[in-house]
Image (cartoon, grey):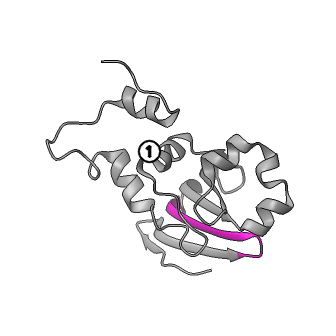
Amino acid sequence: MTGAILVKNGIAQTNNLQATLDIGNVGAVGTANLASETLNMQLTAVLTKAFTQQVGGAGVGGYMSTALANSQGELVIPATVTGTFQNPKVSPDIQKMAQMKLKGLIPTGDNPLGAASSILGGLTGKKGQPATGQQPNPVNQVMDLFGTKKKQ
């Protein structure tokens, strides 16, 4: 495990925590409140191509591997972790999945946090905006995700 954790006023914060596992790598950003023992983290797990194939690969559902596979054949799973230290709640991060597909920023096992800052910037509207300063049409973005475009 590598990364830095800053503790200030009872809040532990990281923007570069990474763990190397036998089946892949996990990157994490977010906070843990040490006083209230609550979590607010975003994780990105990048499972190796070998492990992905071992558990079914494209057989798990061609849709899933197509939606979340990177160019190296690794399966990418973004998730959020909330709740408490004793009762953490892990759920898929659907919004991050959509942003990854829209922006073409799928992390790799070598750098599971590689696209995190661009994706987070996109979610907050600080990066990836058109040069005109206008927000992209969210309907068109979602339709592009499914390969169709809204008629003008």
Q: Residues within 10 Å of mark 1 (few under 14, many from 20)?
A: some
Residue 130 picture location, percent across and down: 22, 44
The region drawn magenta spans 21-33
Q: Which residue is mark 1?
A: 102
Q: Which sits in the foreground, 4 or 39? A: 4
Residue 22 magenta-highlighted: yes
Q: Nearer the viewer, residue 36 or 6?
A: 6
Task: Quarter of the image for the C terminus: give it.
Answer: top left
- Whether residue 36 can be seen here: no
Q: Residue furthest left?
A: 132
- State the count of labels: 1
Residue 23 in which image quadrant = bottom right
Give me the residue at 62% from left, 51% from top: 68
Q: Name the spot of residue 53 as percent of width and height, x first.
A: 81, 61
Which percent across, then down, holds residue 54? 85, 62
Residue 67's spot in the image, x, y percent?
61, 45
